[in-house]
Image (spheres, rainbow, N blue to C red):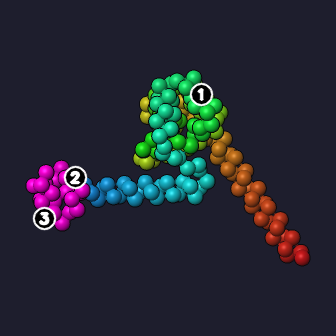
Amino acid sequence: MAILKEAGAKKGLAPSRSLLSLAGSDHGATSELRSSTRSSRTSSVLRGEPRVEVSKDATFVVNAAAEGDLEELVRLAASGLNLGAVGDYDFRTALHLSASNGHAHIVRYLLSQGAWPNSADRFGNTPLSDAIREGHDACKELLTSASKAVAKKSLLERLEESSAAETAETATEAA
């Protein structure tokens, strides 16, 4: 181990990074991934998407979703846990896992509980892209409908905001 640290130090690497470098890890790609992940997470928050929190409770939620265990998800929701707001270390939500594994009944339940259908994990994958990649047509249909509903609601909200702003501007001009 000391030899590896010394070799890394000779290359000007911090001790924690020396093993990765000697193993052939591409630090540029790692930092680029971290940067793009941070950027995509920030932009999703700015677009009004719910933030996915990584927590110890997430393990129970994503495991139940991955296994298609509706009874456990109902129990977790009854305990007050927001099923759509937790994810694993890759920001994969219960919706991602259920869609990837073809559990349409879980996808339907999570959507009914307010899970965000367009949340992206740290790799940029959405539950819909996972369902398509894995060939789960029933999940694909559910998620496509949910995504369209979110887009329609978002458009209506923007139109209402625009209309309210115009009304306020007209009132100001009249005064």
Give the structural element (helix, strand or loop) at label 2: helix
Q: Residue at x 51, y 24 (%)?
A: 68
The earlier-in-sequence mark between 3 and 2 is: 3
**Residue 5 colored in magenta in the image:** yes
Q: Which residue is mark 3?
A: 10
Kind of residue at badge 1:
Arg
Overall secondary structure of the magenta stretch? helix
Q: Is residue 138 visible?
A: no
Where on the picture, by quarter, is residue 9? bottom left
The residue at 42%/44% (across/down) is 89
Residue 53 makes an appearance in the image: yes
- 131 to 30, vertically: above or below: above
Q: Residue at x 56, y 55 (%)?
A: 45
Disc 2: which residue: 20
Numbered disc 3: secondary structure: helix
Q: CA distance from mark 3 to mark 1?
A: 55 Å
- Classify 10 Å Cα crowding around label 2: few (below 14), some (14-19), many (20 and above): some
Q: Are marks 1 and 2 in contact (CB under 8 Å)?
A: no
Amino acid on which the number 2 mark rests in the picture: Leu
Mark 1, residue position = 75
Which callout, 1 or 2, points at the residue further toward the start of the chain? 2
